[in-house]
Image (cartoon, rainbow, N blue to C red):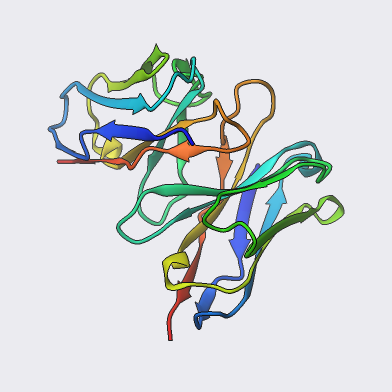
Amino acid sequence: EEELVESGGGLVRPGGSLRLSCAASGFSFGFYPMNWVRLAPGRGLEWISFINGPSEFINYADSVKGRFTISRDNAKSSLYLQMNNLRHEDTAVYFCARDPGGPRSRFDLWGQGTLVTVSS
Amino acid sequence: DIHMTQSPSSLSASIGDRVTITCRASQSIDIYLNWYQHKPGKAPKLLIYAASSLQSGVSSRFSGSGSGTDFTLTISSLQPEDFATYYCQQSHSAPLYTFGQGTKLEI
């Protein structure tokens, strides 16, 4: 069964750092572009970062650019999100999501998310 | 950036009702429009991609239409498991994506 499982969330003070992980199983992880998406309390889904299979191309939303870093280890079937200089508004459930590739980009497999709370 | 606007923001309906949710893009996105369903504590689920293609395994109660700037998601006959929040997403500017603000479907 294809599955994504996020981990690494928790409580962190403003200005702090956290590293999220996403473990993939049941498919050839290295072939697929991957994304991070978050859902903040009272708000909608927000895409925050993209990485292609070979890590050749990376993109970020303006809201996290310069503070968050996406990476992946295809040998470990894992996706990561290093979050630095965290702000209150980064409080959210963070999801990893797979793009099956091809011209009609969409997110066809998601994890259940990991909660990040930024609070003093 | 392309801005996505959904309407309504919330919707009350009954079992068996036909429901339509709309999504408007701030500029033409051809058919690069996806629809997702999300329930609290669960993984979001892809329903429709490329405006009208039904994702494998998704009930045929769900259908999508539209192109350019105006899109709709229709649920033909509401079932109890359909009460959730629905989001549209543009992928025209991939790999930079934007979602609509969501439509909460309630009983």
- Relative to B59, is A57 above or below? below
- Relative to B98, is A17 above or below? below
- Which residue is nearer to you in this view: B46 or A61? A61
Instruction: Quarter of the image for the C terminus of chain A: give it.
Output: bottom left
Left or right placement of residue B75 versus residue A101 in this view: left
Q: Residue at x 61, y 56 (%)?
A: A65
- Relative to A50, is A7 above or below? below
Left or right placement of residue A31 versus residue A98 in this view: right
Q: x%, y% of residue A52?
A: 75, 40
- Which residue is nearer to you in this view: A32 or A45? A45
Q: Residue at x 47, y 38 (%)?
A: B98
Instruction: Quarter of the image for the N terminus of chain A: give it.
Output: top right
Q: Looking at the image, how many numbered discs can be counted on the residues?
A: 0
Q: x%, y% of residue A60?
A: 62, 49
- The part of the image, by quadrant, that contains residue A19 is bottom right
- Which residue is nearer to you in this view: B76 or B6? B6
- Relative to B106, is B34 above or below? above
Left or right placement of residue A14 versus residue A60 in this view: left
- The part of the image, by quadrant, that contains residue B87 is top left
Q: x%, y% of residue A28?
A: 79, 39
Left or right placement of residue B105 versus residue A99 in this view: left
- The residue lying furthest to the bottom in this view is A120
- The residue lying furthest to the right in this view is A75
Q: x%, y% of residue A53?
A: 79, 40
